[in-house]
Amino acid sequence: MKTYRKELWFNLPQRRQLINITPEVMKALAESDIEEGLCLVNAMHISASVFINDDESGLHQDFETWLEKLAPEKPYSQYRHNTFEDNADAHLKRTIMGREVVVAVTKGKLDFGPWEQIFYGEFDGKRKKRVLIKIIGE
Amino acid sequence: MKTYRKELWFNLPQRRQLINITPEVMKALAESDIEEGLCLVNAMHISASVFINDDESGLHQDFETWLEKLAPEKPYSQYRHNTFEDNADAHLKRTIMGREVVVAVTKGKLDFGPWEQIFYGEFDGKRKKRVLIKIIGE
Amino acid sequence: MKTYRKELWFNLPQRRQLINITPEVMKALAESDIEEGLCLVNAMHISASVFINDDESGLHQDFETWLEKLAPEKPYSQYRHNTFEDNADAHLKRTIMGREVVVAVTKGKLDFGPWEQIFYGEFDGKRKKRVLIKIIGE
């Protein structure tokens, strides 16, 4: 069995932002030299997400509007977590979007349907954060 | 290490429908001849879901009502994604339900609790779609 | 390839409760003697969750309030599932929080970011329930 580990680093200028990281995950898979297995991609921070969806800007605006409706950022006073932080909403938004994805690796490629793309979802940006890629297989 | 890959195909007559795919996943596991490992089951389309819950028709009606409340299909004009599509709600519903499940394989069986069943959740049907099963182990 | 399997048992006195199970998962990983691989931790019951977030009591109260807003327990009559049960809300709450986490194992440790902690989320307690830990690797 082979394993491969790689971190991706982010320091995004906005509080909330979605970044397509599919090319970076493909690059890591090529570096791993793994042909068959599983690829885990997860946020290492609890106010960020890794998820799979469509790379379409209208949909990304819809995610922003929808997440703000389900777990609004303000008023900060509505959350108990915010007595010493202001990012409770980011923890809730990431819960909806998910921490991680597990992707099949087949013949050395991410085994994806036609529109699947991997995103890093930042919900409390303006600081350094990491994504972990761990691939196992052979 | 062994790996096994199989696709399940769907073309459902309704926009939204939940299908119990546990028997198909069990069949794939038997075909794989893998005794110990992990089984990934994921939707290959971004407006569909694979999730684990109860096979109880009342609960499935509750899911429909609840998802329509959290991410209503109509009016289509409420979503930016719908300037050229009408399925933004399906992307959001699938986000809540999840893209994938990872199930432990133990002694050649899906290592399940008493009521766990795997479902394909279609949220934008009337077209061909796929689910991927990837099993690794030995 | 090595695999390791362990169950954690719970019988919580409250209907809803969040329990930090990180120490138990670390213990299972040490017992497994696996250095590199993947660690699946999942609820074996469909009205409970395993998820990763912050071990901060204010945030945990925010989760309770938020989940009650998105999927309220009462009135029981609002759910079809409740004609013979009263836990439909628990199935919905667990759907938002997620069934499982997959954690990378690197150099014999859970490969975590600075604040990641694994929780068991009980949404229909006062009965025996289990969490499954399955680790594969070498």
Image (cartoon, coloured by chain):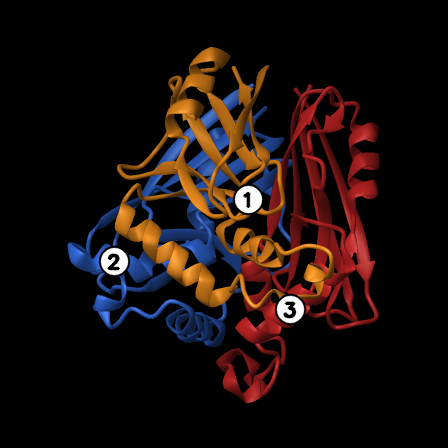
Chain colours: A red, B orange, C blue
Do marks 2 and 1 share a subunit?
no
- Kindly report the distance in space between the C-alpha atoms of the residues bearing marks 3 and 2: 30 Å
**Marks 3 and 2: CB-CB under 8 Å?**
no
Is there any visible trace of residue C125 in the rendered image? no
Kindly tell me whether residue C97 is visible in this rendering: yes
Q: In the rendering, which numbered label is found on residue B48?
A: 1
Q: Chain of mark 2?
A: C
In which quarter of the view is residue C115 placed?
bottom right
Q: Residue A51, how many percent across, how many down?
A: 65, 50
Which label's residue is closer to the chain start, 3 or 1? 1
Q: From the viewer's perspective, is B103 left or right of A69?
A: left
Q: Amino acid at mark 2?
A: Arg
Residue B77: which numbered mark, if any?
3
Mark whose residue sits in front, 3 or 1: 3
- Share a chain, discs 3 and 1? yes
Dot 3: few (<14), some (14–19), or many (≥20) neighbours within 10 Å? few
The correct choice, above or below, for B31 with respect to B95 in the image is above
Question: Does dot 3 land on a helix, a strand or a loop?
Answer: helix
Q: Type of residue at label 1? A: Ala
Tell me if residue A85 comes above or below residue C20 in the rendering: below
Q: Residues within 10 Å of mark 2 (few under 14, many from 20)?
A: many
* Dot 3: chain letter: B
Residue that numbered label 2 is attached to: C80
Image quarter (top left, top right, bottom left or bottom right) of the N terminus of chain A = top right
